[in-house]
Image (spheres, rainbow, N blue to C red):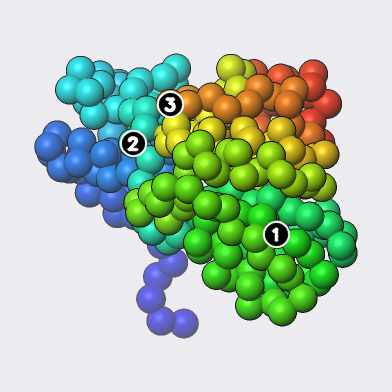
Amino acid sequence: MNGAAPKDSDAPLARAERRPPRLDKAARQARILAEMRASASARVGDLATELNVSTETIRRDLFELGEKGLINRTYGGAVRPLASEPSVTERHGLMVAQREAIAAATVKLIAPKEVIAIGAGATTTHVARRMAAACRDLTVITHSFSVATVVSANPTIEVIMCPGRYNAREGMMVGVETGEFLQNYNVNRAILGISGITTDGLADAEPDAAYVYRAMMNRAAQTIIVSDHQKFDVPSLAIWARIPDIQHLVTDRAPEGAVARALGRARVEITVAET
């Protein structure tokens, strides 16, 4: 047998070699900001492990970034500043596996002949794509061009597009005309995404979108929230619903802490999709 077995004393060295190289402060803080652009939130412990530094170092970094207004510090980590969510085009490339799993679980809640209102967003577009593949004989009301485009691939699904003012960044129609148009319809289920959920409620980074989501929710017999776990305990600009207003949450990971307790008190049904 060629070669000698590694000695126990070699194990710490092997582990050290697998650790990522340490960055200087400027590079480290740039990595933190990149993480915040890609995700809704980040935790001190996760950042310390990823960047191979102490939690105290990460806390100092977050303090400095917070002082510059680049992040909002939270207990145990940080979140993006309010209203700084990436555009819908950027979001389409994030959390793809999780969103596909959420979409697959969501369409199982839909029955033929139903009227479904779908809000704009990356996760709801995944739901619409899965609806086109798995559902039939539906009426879909939406203000999102991406949702309308993908769901209309199924000829048994009728699509009703809301009028309004076009928001190019999000690919959606918004405004008073949109809200008034929705008042003309009865909806079985509203399927809506969020920028964040806290014990204060469900919120979106776009106030105009929040107005439309509230209108959809108010016309629906049931409101289903589709969201990955990175939106939990994350504040956003415009609150459009309180937790007791919704009936179902479909996500990739069960919520924890105060948000989980608030959902439990409101008896919101939670479906955790298999990823």
The foreground one among 184 and 220 is 184
Which residue position holds label 2? 84
Which residue position holds label 3? 237
Q: Which mark sits nearer the N-terminus, 2 or 3?
A: 2
Disc 2 is placed on an element classified as loop
Q: Is residue 15 visible?
A: no
Q: CA distance from mark 3 to mark 1?
A: 27 Å
Location of residue 138 by image quarter: bottom right
Which residue position holds label 1? 140
Q: Residue at x 63, y 73 (%)?
A: 152
Q: Residues within 10 Å of mark 3 (few under 14, many from 20)?
A: some
Tell me the amino acid under the disc marked 3: Leu
The foreground one among 95 and 10 is 95
Tell me the amino acid under the disc marked 2: Ser
Q: Which mark sits nearer the N-terminus, 1 or 2?
A: 2
Tell me the amino acid under the disc marked 1: Val
Nearest-to-viewer mark from 1 and 2: 1
**Residue 215, image x, y percentages:** 63, 35
* Residue 165 relative to residue 188: left or right: left
Q: Residues within 10 Å of mark 2 (few under 14, many from 20)?
A: some
Q: Residue at x 38, y 40 (%)?
A: 85
Q: Is residue 113 visible?
A: yes
The foreground one among 163 and 43 is 163
* Residue 186 relative to residue 26: left or right: right
Q: Which mark sits nearer the N-terminus, 3 or 1?
A: 1
